[in-house]
């Protein structure tokens, strides 16, 4: 991560919280609910190697920005693979677009570049 800030430290603490990453934490519950299937590309994800392109990541649909209520809300989570998370979601979050895409893989946000420039698909 290029970003280092007090906010990043807070985030790091949240992701280490047992309510998130514990054996019955939100992260585990989200993976079970979504059957270890990426909610973006439908691939079956793996655990145990977080650097693998299909490593399981639990994403917050609405950016939590350090808000514990949003962070620990199972309804606000979706299981996605590392590829989708890294390429799609982080860019969307950084750019402030609506998170989510249709079955064809295009983001839902009408103002997203993918929906305004035909030559900019992944
Ligand atoms: Zn995926």
Image (spheres, rainbow, N blue to C red):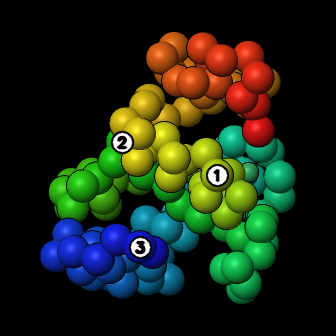
Which is closer to the viewer, label 2 or label 3?
3
Residue at numbered disc 1: 87
Q: Quadrant of residue 107?
A: top right
Pick whichever of labels 2 and 3 is earlier in the sequence.
Answer: 3
How many discs mark residues in the rendered view?
3
Question: Who's the residue at 49% across and 67% down the image?
Answer: 27
Relative to the observer, which residue lies in front, 78 or 91? Answer: 91
Quadrant showing the C terminus: top right
Relative to the observer, which residue lies in front, 37 or 84? Answer: 84
Relative to the observer, which residue lies in front, 5 or 58? Answer: 5
Pick whichever of labels 1 and 3 is earlier in the sequence.
Answer: 3
Marks 1/3 in contact by CB < 8 Å: the verdict is no
Q: Please tell me whether mark 3 sits on a helix, a strand or a loop.
A: loop
Q: What crowding class fits label 1: few (fewer than 14 Cα within 10 Å), some (14-19), or many (20 or more)?
A: few
Residue at numbered disc 2: 62
Q: What crowding class fits label 2: few (fewer than 14 Cα within 10 Å), some (14-19), or many (20 or more)?
A: some
Q: Position of residue 2 (x, y in %)?
A: 41, 73
Residue at numbered disc 3: 2
Q: Please tell me whether mark 2 sits on a helix, a strand or a loop.
A: loop
Report, in whole angstroms, how far the alpha carbon at label 1 lies from the one at label 3.
Answer: 16 Å
Report, in whole angstroms, how far the alpha carbon at label 1 lies from the one at label 2.
Answer: 17 Å
Relative to the observer, which residue lies in front, 32 or 58? Answer: 58
Q: Is residue 75 visible?
A: no
Question: Who's the residue at 57% across and 24% down the image?
Answer: 113
Pick whichever of labels 1 and 2 is earlier in the sequence.
Answer: 2
């Amino acid at each position: 991560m290029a970003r280092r800030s007090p906010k990043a430290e807070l985030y790091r603490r949240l992701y280490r919280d047992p309510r998130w990453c514990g054996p019955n934490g939100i992260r585990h519950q989200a993976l079970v609910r979504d059957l270890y299937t990426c909610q973006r590309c439908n691939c079956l994800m793996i655990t145990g190697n977080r650097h693998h392109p299909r490593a399981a990541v639990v994403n917050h649909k609405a950016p939590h920005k350090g808000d514990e209520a949003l962070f620990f809300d199972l309804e606000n989570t979706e299981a996605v693979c590392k590829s989708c998370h890294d390429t799609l979601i982080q860019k969307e979050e950084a750019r402030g677009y609506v998170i989510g895409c249709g079955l064809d893989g295009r983001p839902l946000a009408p103002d997203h570049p993918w929906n305004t420039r035909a030559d900019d698909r992944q």
